[in-house]
Image (cartoon, rainbow, N blue to C red):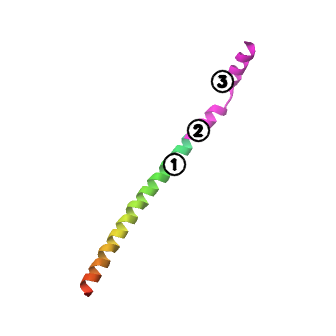
Amino acid sequence: MTLQLKSLNRFLRSEDGPTAVEYAVMLALVVMACIAAVMLLGTNTSASFSDSQEKITEAMNSGS
């Protein structure tokens, strides 16, 4: 029983748990920033392709 209490006491005093939580929070923030960047780039890229398609279609129709 004392071995279990010593293990519990050592676990509660250890700073490995809070450090792991801090790293997890930082990782979550980095992932959210990456997702936001990909979404923004995806929207801008889609708009650019749509604009290009419209201009190409106009050029082809006016040349005929």
Residue 25 vs residue 39: left or right? right
Residue with the mark numbered 3: 12
Place of residue 33 in the rendered image (x, y in percent of width and height, measured from the top left): 48, 51
Residue plotted at (41% across, 60% down): 42
Residue 22: mark in rendering = 2
Q: Which residue appears at 51% of the width and 48% of the height?
A: 31
Q: Residues within 10 Å of mark 2 (few under 14, many from 20)?
A: few
Label 3: element kind = helix
- The local secondary structure at tag 2 comes to helix
Q: Which residues are magenta?
A: 1-24
Residue placed under numbered mark 1 in the picture: 31
Counting other residues with Cα less than 10 Å from the Cα at mark 3, is it few (<14), some (14-19), or many (20 or more)? few
Find residue 26 and report its image quarter.
Answer: top right
Residue type at mark 3: give it.
Answer: Leu
Q: Nearer the viewer, residue 3 or 9?
A: 3
4 within the magenta span: yes
Nearer mark to the viewer, of 2 and 1: 1
Answer whether residue 62 is magenta in the image: no
- Of callouts 2 and 1, the N-terminal one: 2
